[in-house]
Image: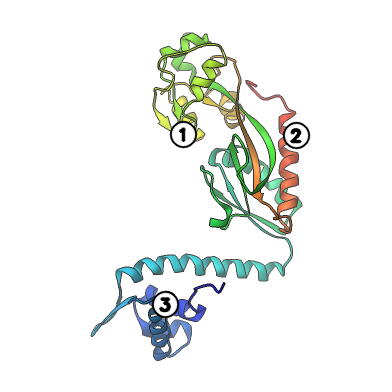
Amino acid sequence: MRRKIPSTRALVAFDASARHQSFSKAAAELALTQSAVCRQIAALEEFLGLALFHRTKRGVALSEAGRSYAARIALHLNGLERDTLELMARRGLGGSLELAVVPTFATRWLMPRLASFQRKNPDITINLTTRTRAFLFGDTAFDAAIHCGEAPWPGVEARTLMQEQLVPVCSAQLIAPLTSLTPEQLQRYPLLQQTTRPYAWRQWFKSLGLTLEHDMTGPRHELFSMLSQAAIQGMGIALIPPFLVEDELASGALVIPVLHPFASGNAYRLLYPEGQSDNPALKPFADWLVQQARAYCQQSVPGA
């Protein structure tokens, strides 16, 4: 089925005209005549069936539809130019990987290790974008994703990196003069909740055979990085995987008041669409990532 896409020439002419709010300035940038730019814009408007510019005696101005379309087209043209320049620079070697990754895992675990991959694979570029929710690869430009959840998504291949274990963490000042608590004593303090894991505290208490009335009550934050900062500031007690707060535990900014790791049932996995094995950047990155995760899991993890 033929794609319903305007000509590239028309889109480039529209992009330049939208940026300059002028056909003559767009023509100068593109080394075309003003009439040539006008023809491209007219052809694009005919293709779309709507006006992208308002014509006045003083010149042209984007219509509301034109303003919205210009913002989207600029993103696509910029991406197309970037990918083209990258391919030309690499002469088809190595390649790049568009990777979606959960934010705190990216900053606290992946980034400190990524330089070692780049040193071994200088021809491969890893581009990171944070995503906290599941998505369809067909609706995005992502080649792979690192996600934490109960099971792989449909239509993808998965390589498990590590199981998620949660431990309670808080500021030492919050529980002072005590240095540790019993599980029952936790209910005296605010329980920080994670938006994407609304039942985490309930499951943690249940693993100890306890039922508390207010286990789902407390300030809610979406990211582990937000929870850790809230805990450091004494706002309450949070459930966080120890590997995401290693530095804070080592420095004493956070302590573990109850040493009871809880296997949440979630796992961090590398996911990619089925049949993606022809991506030259994916296999070396996936092999390296699994090796790094395996080496980490063999180490002694605080609180685990």
Q: Which residue lies under the disc numbered 1?
A: 226
Give the mark count.
3
> Which is more N-terminal, label 1 or label 3?
3
Is 59 left, or right, of 120 in this rendering?
left
Give the number of the mark in front: 3 or 1. 3
Camera-nearest label, 2 or 3? 3
Alpha-carbon distance for marks 2 and 1? 27 Å
Mark 2–mark 3 distance (CA, rounded to whole Å): 52 Å
Q: Earlier in the sequence, mark 2 or mark 1?
A: 1
Work out which quarter of the rendered image holds the N terminus and state it.
bottom right
Residue linked to disc 2: 295
| Observer-nearest of 168 and 151 | 151
**At 49% across and 17% down in the image, what residue appears?**
172
Q: Label 3: how many residues lie within 10 Å, few (<14), some (14-19) or many (20+)?
A: many
Q: In which quarter of the image is residue 20?
A: bottom left
**Mark pair 3, 1: CA separation:** 42 Å
Q: Position of residue 181 (x, y in %)?
A: 51, 10
- Residue holding disc 3: 14
Q: Position of residue 116 (x, y in %)?
A: 72, 46
Circle 2 crowding by C-alpha within 10 Å: few under 14, some 14–19, many from 20 = few
